[in-house]
Image: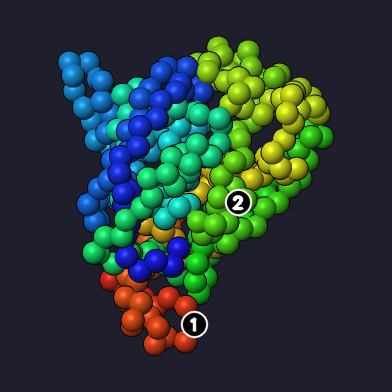
Amino acid sequence: MTAAKQTTLRDRIVLSGAGVHSNAPARLVLHPSEPHSGISFLRTGLPGGRERLIEAKFSHVSMTELCTVLGAEGESISTVEHLLAALSGLGVDNAVVEVDGPELPIMDGSAAQFVEAIDHVGLVQLSAPRRFIKVLKTVRVENGRSFSELRPADRGFRLEVEIDFAAGAIGRQKKVIDLDPASFRREISRARTFGFLADVERLWKAGFALGASLENTVALDGDRVVNPGGLRYADEFVRHKTLDAVGDLALAGAPIVGCYRSFCGGHKMNVSVLKALFADRANYQIIEAQPRREAARVASGMAFNPVYAPDVN
């Protein structure tokens, strides 16, 4: 993300569909928003005509089992990660996401239709400079052999995501990407969510995957991909895990300057590493992009102004 100015949508976007877990229908309206407002979800259609505004921040995550759920004051919105990935991957800083159901539509199981809709209306630059979260110290969370970490980097945002499944159709896969709108569209946006037929009955009993189908999920039966069209990428599974990570890490509240690395991670560890990062002000710094005419005087890439530095003992 190298643009110096914050962005928002040029026009509103309307989409609809059903949730992959709840199978509940939902109408989604993405509205342009003001500078420094960030991304927020407006949950409408609540009993008594109530509405609830929930900021897309890691501190509002209420559940991470099979999807990322944001909650505030007893109300929640589920499966936010794919839309957040599209907004973050395309460099949308500010938007209000209005949704009248308990879960965002799953669409085709990837971020492709969100990307198409955002590209159709386009973005507009705002007057305010873009802010970034620069990682200053490595933070790491572990769970058994799994881990996720954020490390410092001079510029940009790199993701190094690795998975290891016993299923022969997946096995061990790794994806490394330097995130920008072009690489997100090309390498990540079309990767679909996936699941195992052997888990379906258990998930149904737990209230999950009620809206899953071959139209929105890559289904595996043992070592075999069931979908008639097969995979979109040979390594679609790790690409989708990378897509999830982009969406979850967008809950930092601003683009990250650093490197994210994970092994057999998931929603819970993505959110946990953000909590670890923000637990100590010495771990990060908020920086502000300079106007291009000033940045041009700097020999290597985008120049930044510190907004505040970490506490120093």
In the picture, the quarter occupied by the N terminus is bottom left
Relative to residue 64, is residue 187 depicted above or below?
below
Q: Please tell me in which quadrant of the rendered image residue 296 appears.
A: bottom left
Instruction: Tell me which residue sits at (28%, 71%) in the image.
Output: 307
Q: Secondary structure at mark 1?
A: loop
Looking at the image, residue 106 sits to the left or right of residue 9; the answer is: right
Determine which residue is flagged by label 1. 300
How packed is label 2: few (under 14 Cα within 10 Å), some, or many (20 or more)? few
Instruction: Tell me which residue sits at (49%, 28%) in the image.
Output: 106
Instruction: Tell me which residue sits at (32%, 29%) in the image.
Output: 99
In front: label 2 or label 1: 2
How packed is label 1: few (under 14 Cα within 10 Å), some, or many (20 or more)? few
Between discs 2 and 1, the one toward the N terminus: 2
Near-viewer residue (166 or 17): 17
Looking at the image, residue 120 sits to the left or right of residue 148; the answer is: left
Instruction: Tell me which residue sits at (70%, 51%) in the image.
Output: 174
Determine which residue is flagged by label 2. 186
Kind of residue sitting beneath label 1? Ser
Query: Where residue 310 appears, x then y in whole percent?
Result: 33, 70
Looking at the image, residue 34 sits to the left or right of residue 259; the answer is: left
Query: Where residue 253 appears, x then y in whole percent?
Result: 35, 53
